[in-house]
Amino acid sequence: MKRPQRLLSIIVALQSAGQTTAARLAEQFGVSARTILRDIEALIEADVPVAAEPGRYGGISLQVGTQIDVNRLSETEAEALALVGLDSRSARQLGLEEGMLRAFQRLDTRRSKPLGRADQHWVLLSEVVEIDSSGWFADEAAVDFADLVETLRSTRRLRVEYRSSGRAESRIYEVDPYGLYLRGGRWYLVGDVDSRPRMFAMSRLRGWTELDADRRTRPEATLQDVAGDLVDRLESRNDVIVTAYLDADREDLAHRILGSRLRSVEPLPTNDLKMRITVAYDQLDGVRQLMQFTDHIEVIDPPSARELVKKLAGDMAARH
């Protein structure tokens, strides 16, 4: 949970619980008591009427008679929620489509009149911005895993059957799950396997079973933090740096296909029609990706990458 969301949730918790302690709030939100105390200080500095009494019989509470309506959205908040909320396909996969539709119906009541702007021609944000989180050429046969969401919310361990990319056989893993992660239109299960973080593509998950044991995730580790670390680790791996000459008119295509793997693009001073690119991979086999450029590319270095391209091209020629 990000800090702004946690601050709002602390207010809700204080309204429902009356007086509580930093230790109880820390346990509820999965952070340290020190973090909670810093949050309380931030709320007090923001003029939220929070009282913190030290001592054995002290605690944290809202001042007597205080009621804060945290459900009333401003126009900007309502627009933001309507714009970036889950798309219908993802909501259906999570079993949240009905709830999403009800929420959007409530937000629609705000659209009956223009926003409070002096300019009468001002239009809603959703009329000028459209967000589609699905991937290009994505398979529309979306797999529903609402039952997995319910299992994850029970904070139980999982036994999953999973087929890794490029393998025909699946394996069984015992996972301490953090939750589901959506990136680039694809869903992933994020969890620890033997106390090490791992990401499982939902499209290759053959099945899962809830175990009769609580998950044992790392203290203070959140889904957002673990998923972010895994992505950073994947995108920063550069065990193999490939240098190649590429046709200059294929630069846009290179950025689109290679993404963050494309580390540099330099013009060739002796040839305006070519450019030198460097591409980073975590293993030599990643060079297969460059075959998409067909005769528009020539791999120069390292020699092992050039040999692999030569072999792949020869195999392709022989097959055809």
Image (cartoon, helix red, strand yellow):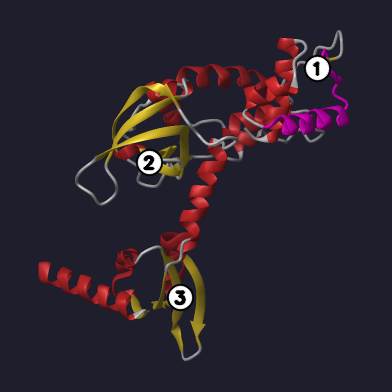
Tell which residue pokes out farthest to the top in this image. Answer: 65
The answer to whether residue 320 is seen in the rendering is: no
* Quadrant placement of the C terminus: bottom left
First of labels 1, 3 by sequence position:
1
Is 125 on the left or on the right of 225, as rendered?
right
Out of 200 and 107, give the one closest to the viewer: 200
Q: Where is residue 180 in the image (x, y as percent from the top left)?
A: 45, 34
Q: Quadrant of residue 162?
A: top left
First of labels 2, 1 by sequence position:
1
| Viewer-nearest of discs 2 and 1 | 1
Q: How far is disc 2 from disc 1 in space, using C-alphas?
A: 42 Å
Is mark 3 in CB contact (under 8 Å) with mark 2? no
**Residue 89, placed above or below residue 295:** above
According to the image, label 3 marks what residue? 277
- Which span is picked out in magenta? 32-57
* Quadrant placement of the N terminus: top right
Type of the residue with mark 3: Ile
For the image shown, how many numbered marks are present on the structure?
3
Query: Could you say whether the residue bearing mark 3 is in a helix, strand or loop?
Result: strand
According to the image, label 1 marks what residue? 59
Query: Could you say whether the residue bearing mark 2 is in a helix, strand or loop?
Result: strand
Q: How far is disc 3 from disc 2 in space, using C-alphas?
A: 31 Å
According to the image, label 2 marks what residue? 200
**Residue 179, placed above or below residue 9:** below
The answer to whether residue 270 is seen in the rendering is: yes
Type of the residue with mark 2: Phe
Is 13 on the left or on the right of 138, as rendered?
right
